Amino acid sequence: MEVQLRNRDMKASDLRAQNLIPAEYYGKGVENKTLQMDYQSFRRVYRTAGGNTIITLKIDGKEEINVLAHDVQLDPITDSIVHVDFANVRMGEALQTQVSLEFIGIAPAVKELGGSLTTNTTEVEIKCLPKDLIHSIEVNIESLVDFQSYIRVKDLIVPDTIEILNDPEEVVANVVAPREEVEEEPVVAEGEEGAEGEEGAEGAEGEGAEGGEEKKEGGGGEGGGKKE
């Protein structure tokens, strides 16, 4: 990919206005360089290479250097690339970098038992020579047949030229059982129960009072008949 040495007197904001990305190149035993590059050219390369594939930079059409895109800074609002740090790569020396995990397949414990897939990590750290770098590691989750099945770091399949530095017993993925929904019985507040009791009592008292009045009226009529 073509890049140019940057004029240090030019502000980073001015470069971005010209659709250029400011960048820094550094590493052990090399001279740091301040660079600039075309926005779309880098975006296309980075989309394919990511942060763990070697990129060859050609400076001003002359010097070629092998690098990794160590740090790509994005604008928090527009998500556009605003700055890149390139780390020098020595082809004869092992390096350490993060590699993403790509989960493939369907877990039987999800499809047949209704569980939920849990991925505890999405990347691991590896060590290898630059020529042996891989872009990602595939993780087949079809071995998760029940809720007691686990995929651990030691189960990941990588070439013999690559060493995974994470704890071998670290859990990468598993399936958790669905939560059982418990039906809650309706709870009646003590105040409501008391109110219902009082209403019942008042109703009974009212009925008793009405009955008493009817008896009084009836008794007066009979007495009048005897006097005649």
Image (spheres, rainbow, N blue to C red):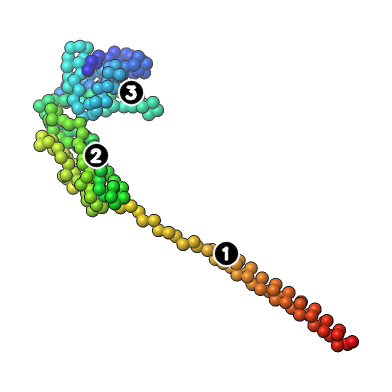
Q: Which mark is residue 103?
A: 2
- Classify residue 44 as left or right of residue 159: right
Q: Which residue is mark 1?
A: 192
Q: Earlier in the sequence, mark 2 or mark 3?
A: 3
- Using the numbered discs, state the Cα–Cα distance from disc 1 to disc 3 in whole angstroms: 65 Å
Dot 1: what SS? helix
Q: Earlier in the sequence, mark 1 or mark 3?
A: 3
Residue found at x 17% / y 17%: 64
Q: Which of labels 1 and 3 is toward the front? A: 1
Whole-percent x, y for residue 131 in the image: 13, 27
Q: Nearest the camera: 203 or 192?
A: 203
Q: Nearest the camera: 189 or 63?
A: 189
Residue 181 higher or lower than 204, as above or below: above
For the N terminus, the image quarter is top left
Whole-percent x, y for residue 111 in the image: 28, 47
Whole-percent x, y for residue 203 in the image: 66, 70
Dot 3: what SS? strand
